[in-house]
Amino acid sequence: MNPVITSLLDTDLYKFTMWQALLHRHPQTQSEYRFVCRNTPAYPLAELLPEVNAALDHLCSLRFTPEELAYVGSLRYIKSDFVDFLRIFQFQRSFISAWAEGEQLHIVAQGPQVHVMGFEIFVLAIVNELYFRRFDAAQALASGRARLAAKVHQLQALARQAALRHPFELFDFGLRRRYSGAWQREVVQTFATEAPQWFKGTSNVLLARDLNLVPIGTMAHEYLQTYQALGVRLRDFQKAALEDWVQEYRGDLGIALTDTVGMDAFLADFDLYFAKLFDGLRHDSGDPVAWGEKALAHYTRLRIDAHTKRLVFSDGLDLERALMLYRHFGDRTQLGFGIGTNLTNDMGADHKPLNIVMKLVRANGQPVAKLSDTPGKTLCDDETYLAYLRQVFNVKD
């Protein structure tokens, strides 16, 4: 079997940025990550179990090469001791297990967080690529290339439209649910070559290095969720996580994720101090227009010029939706659009993408959760804890 993952750089930038922050500040944390498929696949994922286990065996044999370490170390916010940690790092096979129950594929990573948090993106890429290898590749690629050409043409048409105050900026966020690694590379290369005025980077660190692009990413939900289990008062976990981020990066990586317990609860914690220190906010659930209006109103209340801030949209976007949001907000604030599945796994009606995630569910032996602004995105196996979290942050069920 051709391996799905051949480089440990083939992951999202925010894995490295969260990894460094947690290694420096909470290296003792124990955690559990769980794989879930949210939609119905064309065939049972349990059939992939032997191939998944073989791919995990291979993943756990990889090490960072000197060239890869040099690239990571060249990023100004990465510290030398973290590079030294990566120099000796290797995934431990005993920390991750995959098994089948009926038609369901189960994958759980459990152990020290700084040794298991990196599994997430690789597991999702592995399951996706193995799943789609059973489909007609020629048909998928033909359809995918036609759709890709249409997207590039749509972007190029922006040059003929009236300019808004702030530019349209597009990023590739499609590693986790890509059709394949080779296809993601082709998509990113195409956008970088044919639409460089609007295409500004990728979350995939390997592609950023190979194609001389900007690696994009800051934090994910797992970073903030971890602070629910670190001994701080639960009501203060967001402020503790944001404060540690500020101290770790001191001005770099300044986009804050807002929906770990919902936008309203986030803004209650995002006071003038944080609003001045962070460059902007990222949307990942709920109505994006309503979210953006709340964000701009919050900056107005704090008497902060929204033109100096950035709103990044990354929830289930396609290019049409991104352009709609750009027309709505482009004269009022800086913007960024991270498009995932619709860029890297838009292969036609016969190749429906999987909706798979691998989320942090426990830290230090206690449940953690995300109270998303979109129903159905919450992942937690402890209803008592969910009820408590909702009560603390006044979030309706």
Image (spheres, rainbow, N blue to C red):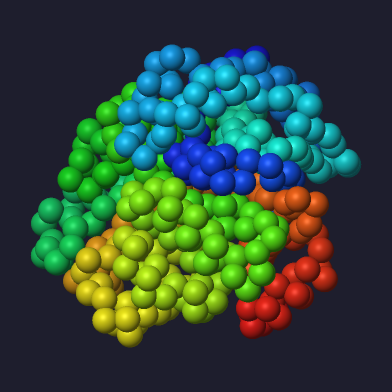
Please give the name of the residue rendered at 83% of the width and 34% of the height, measured from the top-left corner.
Answer: 99
Q: Position of residue 202 (x, y in %)?
A: 37, 40
Quadrant in which residue 173 is drawn: top left
Horizontally, is 199 left or right of 59 in the view? left
Q: Position of residue 392 (x, y in %)?
A: 68, 78
* Residue 387 position (above or below residue 147): below
Please give the name of the residue rendered at 38% of the width and 21% of the height, measured from the top-left corner.
Answer: 70
Q: Position of residue 165 (x, y in %)?
A: 14, 66
* Residue 33 position (above or below residue 99): below
Count the labels in the image. Answer: 0
Q: Position of residue 26 (x, y in %)?
A: 61, 46
| Quadrant, the C terminus | bottom right
| Nearest to the observer: residue 383 or residue 187 | 383
Can residue 98 be seen in the rendering of this structure?
yes
Please give the name of the residue rendered at 60% of the width and 36% of the height, measured from the top-left corner.
Answer: 118
| Nearest to the observer: residue 21 or residue 290 | 21
Horizontally, is 100 left or right of 138 in the view? right
| Quadrant, the N terminus | top right
Can residue 289 be seen in the rendering of this structure?
no
* Residue 72 position (above or below residue 352): above
Please give the name of the residue rendered at 60% of the width and 65% of the height, measured from the top-left corner.
Answer: 237
Quadrant in which residue 112 is drawn: top right
